[in-house]
Image: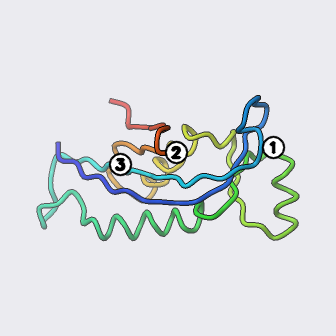
Amino acid sequence: MHKIKKTFHLAYGHRLLNYKGKCENLHGHNGVVEITLETARLNSEKMVMDFTELGKKMKTWLDVNLDHKVILAKADPLARVLAGEGQACYLTAENPTAEILAKLIFDSAGAMKLPVAEVAFWETPTSMASYSRQR
């Protein structure tokens, strides 16, 4: 199998509902997303995919949806308050943990027909969650 990996940076805020600890409070992160594409056959240019094309597709999606947004669970009462104040929010079905965000990005890359194998979501330089295609 051939694989490529591209890294993206984003800034976001979030908090976790029904959680006891520092993450119950609204706070921010400088996150890093690593997207791995995988294929058995290279394209006509002898690439999994051109890094520039991958970069444009994923950076656009990340910029529109997550970068410089407050990411909250749909059930979070703060979501309504922030929306009422015109603040850019992204709402997730569940708590916006690193695990949930990795899967969200994985699913979004798949919806773009990218041969995504894995997404790693680094919440901090020492804390990462990933989601990968089941084998």
Of callouts 3 and 2, which one flags the residue occurring earlier in the amino acid sequence?
A: 3
Q: Which residue is mark 1?
A: 75
Q: Is residue 99 above or below residue 62?
A: above
Q: Residue at x 46, y 52 (%)?
A: 32
Amino acid tagged 1 = Ala
Q: Is residue 129 left or right of residue 21?
A: left
For label 3, count other residues whose C-alpha is less than 10 Å away and answer few (under 14), some (14-19) or many (20+): many
Query: In the image, 13: left or right of 40?
Result: right
The answer to which quarter of the image holds residue 96 is top right
Which residue lies at the image location 41% right of the left edge and 67% below the top edge? 57
Q: Residue 129: image x %, image y %?
A: 48, 37
Quarter placement of the C terminus: top left
The residues bearing labels 3 and 1 have C-alpha atoms spaced at a distance of 30 Å
- Indicate the position of residue 115 as horizontal and vertical percent values: 32, 51
* Cα–Cα gap, marks 2 and 1: 25 Å
Q: Quadrant of the N terminus?
A: top left
Q: Are marks 3 and 1 in contact (CB under 8 Å)?
A: no
Disc 3 on helix, strand or loop? strand
Q: CA distance from mark 3 to mark 2?
A: 23 Å
Question: What residue did someone put label 3 on?
Answer: 116
User: Is 59 drawn above or below residue 26 in the view shown?
Assistant: below
Number of other residues with Cα within 10 Å of mark 2, as a class: few under 14, some 14 to 19, many 20 or more: few
Q: Is residue 29 above or below residue 117?
A: below
Residue matched to label 2 = 124
Q: Position of residue 11 (x, y in %)?
A: 58, 60
Number of marks drawn: 3
Labels 3 & 2 near each other (Cβ < 8 A)? no
Q: Secondary structure at mark 2?
A: strand
Label 2 vs label 1, nearer the camera: 2
The amino acid at mark 3 is: Val
**Residue 36 at what x, y percent from top left?**
32, 48
